[in-house]
Image: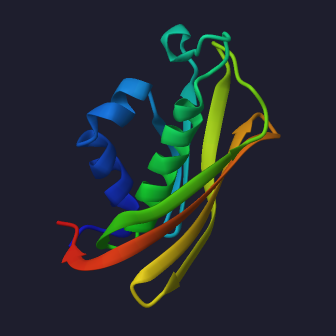
Amino acid sequence: MIEGTKIPAKMLSLDPFSKWLGIEIISVEVGRVKLGMTIRPEMLNSMGKAHGGITYALADSAFGFTSNTHGKKAVSIETSINHIEALEAGDYITAECTLDKTKTKVGFNIVEVKKGDELVALFKGVVYRTNRDWE
């Protein structure tokens, strides 16, 4: 079984979408992962702001990577996001899982997406932890 803090790097290496987004791993602890990325012009919507799917995808990756640091393969069963501030091309944003709570096979997570110190989105996710180990 892989050490929990090494799992996010393995997941990122196998994740073409997160790599396309330009996601970088900033920090990893078991139960807490922080990611970052820069908004690019091709990520904007028709109003010249970052498409909501971009912040959602970054938060979803932070959620998934965090959920798997416990060593068992975990899959998302429900997620939601609140968009608080609009983002533009060139903005650097981070997503950090600030809550990772497990109850038997189900885990509950909160991810804060920020531009600097400003909260721009709040993501909530529920995960199911399988019996399969990361190897």
**Quarter of the rendering containing residue 32:** bottom right
Q: In this view, does 41 lie to the left or right of 12?
A: right
Nearest the eye: 12 or 106: 106
Q: Is residue 71 left or right of residue 55?
A: left
Going 28% across and 40% down the picture, which residue do you hit?
15
Please state which of residues 9 and 126 is positioned toward the viewer in this rendering.
Answer: 126
Position of residue 97 relative to residue 47, above or below, is below
Front-most of residues 98 and 77: 77
Q: Please indicate whether residue 47 sits to the left or right of residue 19 in the image.
A: right
* Residue at the image point whose x is 62% and y is 21% from the top: 50
**Image location (x, y in percent) of residue 66:** 47, 61
Q: In this view, does 66 lie above or below 18?
A: below
Q: Could you tell me which quadrant the N terminus lies in?
A: bottom left
Q: Image check: 58 left or right of 99?
A: left
Q: Which residue in the rendered view is the most extreme toward the bottom?
A: 104
Q: Is residue 70 visible?
A: no
Task: Identify whether 86 is placed above or below 62.
Answer: above
In the rendered image, the vertical position of residue 111 relative to residue 114, given as above or below: below
Q: Residue 61 at x, y = what percent?
A: 45, 47
- Which residue sits at x=34%, y=48%? 9
Residue that appears at 43% across and 27% down: 21
Quarter of the view holding residue 114 = top right
The answer, for residue 52, to whether it is visible in the render is yes
Residue 44 locus on image (x, y percent):
57, 15
